[in-house]
Amino acid sequence: MDVIIWNEAWGTIIHEAIWHWLEADMLNSSVYRDKLWQQVASNFVNIIDEPVRDNLRWSYAFDHEWRESKKTYLIKNWILVSYLHSNKTAALFETESTWHARREAYYCPTLVRMWNTYLDKWTSKKEEIISKIRNWIYVSQMWWWQVNTVTWDFVFKVSYWYLIKDWKLTDIIRWANISWNWPQMLQNIKAICDDLEHFDWWTCWKWQSMPVSDATPTIWVKLKVTGIK
């Protein structure tokens, strides 16, 4: 089905299904390991990590290896242009650090971690997208998810969404699933809206507990939808 994913719900998907797998210490199991400088997304997709972005909870001028933090493009104009690196992974890949070494406390080893990561906005309006197709699903909140790191298939349980009938939001649906293959999905995004919004209130648990921020606009994509009653 055609699915509209609201910006907060989409942030959960993209954090779990792509951003972790662009962290260089995860690349051994990542479908993106040998994709540098290749097209990996639709032609209006730009994914950025910006530790120095203003007015966010965990923005910093320096990472935990005391490298000055800067804006890093991961996917730029649909091309994978960089991974996230610490000093250690940068040496292994014979490249430069991208200033993404973080640790939970002074006694923990540094890991490659996201900071303020976001899918950049585009020009579409959410209301215009809703008006284009008669029957859709509008995803509002996510709950549970699983990503297969070999095949890159994923499934997300949606806790709250709306059925769109006759171009209008109508019935509330609870506890259905959306699924597909992540690299295929990224290359088949039909529209990205202009309502970019950052959510920096949650914590990521990749081996160490770390506050993170993610941000996405609302998007339009085709997904497999199951469990609707």
Image (spheres, grey):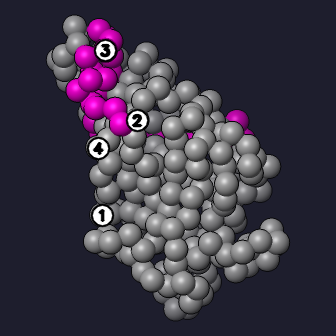
Kindly state the secondary structure of the residue where label 4 is placed. loop
Q: Within the image, what quadrant is residue 3 found in?
A: top left
Kindly state the secondary structure of the residue where label 3 is placed. loop
Earlier-in-chain disc, 1 versus 3 = 3
- Residue hosting label 2: 192
Gap in Å between the C-alphas at discs 3 and 2? 14 Å
Q: Is residue 121 left or right of residue 79?
A: left
Towards the viewer: 194 or 111 = 194
Earlier-in-chain disc, 3 versus 2 = 3
Q: Nearer the viewer, mark 1 or mark 3?
A: 3
- Taking the magenta stretch, the answer to whether it contains residue 137 is yes
Q: Residue 201, labelled with which disc? A: 1
Residue at 66% x, 70% y: name it: 85
Q: Position of residue 51 (x, y in %)?
A: 45, 72
- Taking the magenta stretch, the answer to whether it contains residue 54 is no
Earlier-in-chain disc, 3 versus 4 = 3
Tag 3: Cα neighbours inside 10 Å, few (<14), some, or many (≥20)? few
Q: Residue 111, labelled with which disc? A: none
Kindly state the secondary structure of the residue where label 1 is placed. strand
Tag 1: Cα neighbours inside 10 Å, few (<14), some, or many (≥20)? few
Q: Residue 195, labelled with which disc? A: 4
Gap in Å between the C-alphas at discs 2 and 1? 23 Å
Q: Which residues are magenta?
A: 123-151
Gap in Å between the C-alphas at discs 1 and 4? 18 Å
Tag 4: Cα neighbours inside 10 Å, few (<14), some, or many (≥20)? many
Q: Is residue 68 above or below residue 169?
A: below
